[in-house]
Amino acid sequence: MADPPLAEPVFAEPWEAQAFALVVALHDRGLFGWSEWARALGAETRRSGRPADYAAWLATIEGLLSARGIASPEALAGRRAAFARAAAATPHGQPIVLENDPEARG
């Protein structure tokens, strides 16, 4: 008996799976319902004129966090800046972690 064929990957890129997992986790914690998520993501893509890519997913998550008072726009901007610094300080091919942010080292 032959092995069944392997299924095609559900996600084309690792970021897609990570972003999806983050959205599912936030939904499971009651941050938003699925119809609200779809409306918010649609509004973001119309606003930006881009497809529902990684940046749109993150902007949608950040918008929902901010609208709920969970994270201020300033805190989110600070986290984006920390990630950018960490990315710049991370050797090519290595995972980006916030601990690589030079300003986080004490």
Image (tube, grey):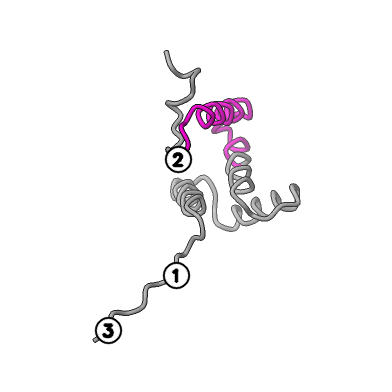
Mark whose residue sits in front, 1 or 2: 2
Task: Tell me which residue sits at (58%, 27%) in the image.
Answer: 81
Task: Tell me which residue sits at (62%, 45%) in the image.
Answer: 55
Q: On residue 2, which mark appears? A: 3
Along the line of sight, the residue nearer the viewer: 63 or 100: 100
Q: Looking at the picture, how far across and down is residue 86, in whole percent?
A: 50, 28
- Amino acid type indicated by mark 2: Gly
Q: Quadrant of the N terminus?
A: bottom left
* Mark 2, residue position: 93
First of labels 3, 2 by sequence position = 3
Tell me if 67 is positioned left or right of 23 in this view. Answer: right
Q: On residue 8, which mark appears? A: 1
Q: Which residues are magenta?
A: 64-92
Q: Looking at the picture, how far across and down is residue 98, in whole percent?
A: 46, 29
Dominant secondary-structure state across the stretch colored magenta: helix
Q: Would you place residue 86 above or below residue 37 in this image?
A: above
First of labels 1, 2 by sequence position = 1
Does residue 73 belong to the magenta stretch?
yes
